[in-house]
């Protein structure tokens, strides 16, 4: 259920509901509006600050009873130093809405003083992120244990054009992120390549986009030997999905977003260890990010041309699966030696990136849960970014920073190509353990020489194995917001 956002330019005392959330930075003084509210509860907020029971530290939560009339409880949320105010507000909003969900509040108020359009957008996306739940496959609890979802939030802010625009864009981004997280959370027997194709078709039909879906026969006709060698071990039909959004001028080169869509990755013949293999349903988070971004772009009606490309299949061991040592011919014509069948995402992307040439793209950004090596290098905090175009790297990093999805650049030096040279073919699909994230990106670079390109390795950031406070264990929505911010930057 989508979170309903309302705005109110009135007094805080006018809000009558289960909870009012108030974010405060470290050493922040109470505004006149908060001082008036504080007086109604006997100065409890000021006293808590004076006694340092609440200090405004990042992620700090402090509950107070509300006044006799109005909000039944107050939630103070710490923002820390709040140097990046939109980012701090986004995080605080997610924490607040998660608390509302845990308490079964149903409705919530929010007050953070004077806000800009960007502040409001960040608040709305944070609120939606914290309120998101995937309950489709859970039996509802008994009436005694049932807690209703957070369904509506009232933001107390001036009734300005910026506030209205911030809510609208925030709701669009939130819808895209919710779609991406839902697709990623679905088990692999439900979120299949066919389901991703039907989801893309639905997005295209609702927003007036062009949709093209290639199946196994069409890809055979295209000569997509790299993609199809991954799909040859599974009975599920592989799908190459192309969505075209025409918001810019006719003939204007499109921004092209590419996503890896492995709906389940067993590793194939080079099978993965059993422990945590269930998490390989998340191997389609790049594709989910593309679909989430296209949903948001369609809602926001951005003035730019965008193409979304997804390569989707499953990687399974069987009597027909590709073997280590096999050599396949890619869509571009290069021959690839298969060293490790678990390095399958780059094989799918090789043909999708080659296919992207027909759209004459202004730039191509691909995102994939590509390597465990990037997790060793950067952990679960930053996405790995790879390109030979320093200007493009800076543009993507800036988009990620605005989106709250940080990225860090890793090298693509020519020396690393030595690691993927093959004895029997043009290149091999794995360079071994050293510099694993770099050699994977070097492999992709072989298929992107005709346009500006950047690769995002989201293996460490697309999902989390523990509760992060702002969101629960599971999919994070990365790289949806980065895609949206990059496209919006190009539109502006």
Image: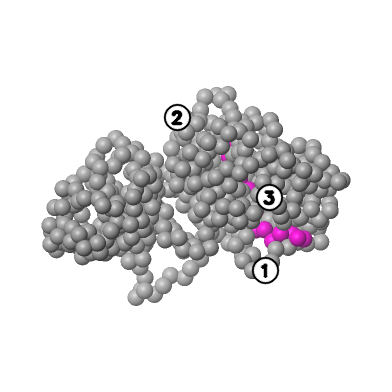
Residue at 61% x, 59% y is 281
Quadrant holding the C terminus = top left
Prevalent SS, magenta region: strand
**Residue 324 picture location, percent across and down:** 81, 56
For the residues labelled 2 and 1, the Cα–Cα distance comes to 47 Å
Residue at which label 1 appears: 274
| One can see residue 34 in this view | yes
**Residue 57 picture location, percent across and down:** 33, 57
**Residue 264 picture location, percent across and down:** 65, 58
75 sits to left or right of 479: left
Which residues make up the magenta segment? 256-270
**Residue 426 picture location, percent across and down:** 82, 41
Residue at which label 3 appears: 435
Q: Please say if the residues under marks 2 and 1 sit with CB atoms less than 8 Å apart.
A: no
| One can see residue 108 in this view | no
In magenta stretch: residue 14 = no
Which one is in front in this view, the residue at disc 3 or the one at disc 1? 3
Say above or below: 350 vs 15. above
Q: Residues within 10 Å of mark 1 (few under 14, many from 20)?
A: few
Residue at 48% x, 68% y is 138
In magenta stretch: residue 259 = yes
Residue at 52% x, 59% y is 464
Secondary structure state at the residue bearing disc 3: loop
Residue at which label 2 appears: 492
Q: Earlier in the sequence, mark 3 or mark 1?
A: 1
Camera-nearest residue between 116 and 171:
116
Q: Residues within 10 Å of mark 3 (few under 14, many from 20)?
A: some
């Amino acid at each position: 259920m989508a979170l309903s956002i309302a705005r109110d330019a009135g007094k805080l005392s006018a809000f009558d509901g289960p909870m009012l959330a108030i974010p405060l930075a470290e050493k922040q003084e109470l505004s006149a509006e908060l001082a008036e509210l504080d007086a109604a509860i006997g100065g409890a907020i000021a006293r808590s600050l004076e006694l340092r029971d609440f200090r405004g530290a990042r992620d700090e939560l402090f509950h107070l009873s509300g006044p006799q009339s109005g909000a039944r409880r107050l939630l103070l949320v710490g923002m820390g130093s709040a140097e990046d105010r939109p980012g701090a507000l986004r995080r605080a909003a997610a924490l607040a809405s998660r608390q509302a969900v845990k308490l079964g509040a149903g409705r919530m108020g929010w007050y953070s003083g004077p806000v800009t359009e960007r502040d409001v957008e960040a608040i709305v996306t944070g609120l939606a992120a914290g309120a998101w739940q995937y309950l489709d496959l859970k039996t509802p609890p008994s009436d005694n244990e049932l807690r209703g979802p957070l369904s509506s939030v009232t933001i107390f802010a001036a009734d300005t054009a910026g506030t209205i625009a911030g809510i609208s864009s925030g709701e669009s981004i939130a819808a895209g992120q919710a779609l991406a997280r839902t697709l990623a959370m679905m088990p692999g027997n439900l979120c299949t390549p066919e389901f991703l194709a039907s989801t893309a078709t639905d997005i295209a039909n609702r927003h007036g986009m062009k949709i093209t879906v290639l199946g196994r026969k069409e890809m055979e006709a295209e000569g997509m030997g790299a993609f199809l060698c991954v799909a040859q071990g599974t009975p599920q039909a592989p799908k190459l999905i192309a969505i075209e959004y025409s918001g810019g001028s006719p003939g204007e080169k499109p921004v092209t977003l590419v996503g890896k869509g492995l709906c389940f990755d067993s590793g194939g013949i080079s099978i993965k260890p059993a422990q945590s293999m269930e998490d390989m349903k998340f191997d389609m988070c790049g594709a989910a990010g593309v679909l989430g971004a296209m949903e948001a772009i369609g809602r926001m009606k951005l003035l730019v041309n965008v193409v979304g490309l997804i390569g989707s299949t499953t990687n399974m061991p069987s009597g027909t699966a590709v073997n280590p040592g096999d050599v396949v011919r890619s869509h571009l014509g290069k021959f690839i030696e298969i060293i490790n069948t678990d390095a399958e995402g780059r094989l799918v992307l090789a043909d999708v990136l080659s296919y992207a040439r027909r759209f004459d793209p202004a730039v191509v950004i691909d995102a994939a849960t590509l390597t465990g090596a990037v997790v060793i290098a950067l952990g679960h905090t930053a996405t790995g970014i790879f390109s030979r175009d320093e200007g493009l790297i800076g543009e993507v990093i800036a988009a990620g920073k605005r989106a709250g999805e940080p990225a860090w650049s890793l090298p693509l030096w020519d020396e690393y190509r030595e690691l993927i040279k093959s004895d029997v073919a043009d290149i091999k699909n794995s360079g071994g353990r050293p510099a694993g994230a770099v050699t994977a990106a070097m492999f992709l670079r072989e298929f992107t020489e005709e346009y500006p390109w950047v690769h995002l390795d989201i293996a460490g950031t697309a999902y989390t194995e523990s509760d992060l406070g702002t969101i629960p264990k599971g999919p994070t929505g990365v790289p949806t917001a980065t895609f949206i911010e990059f496209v919006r930057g190009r539109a502006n």
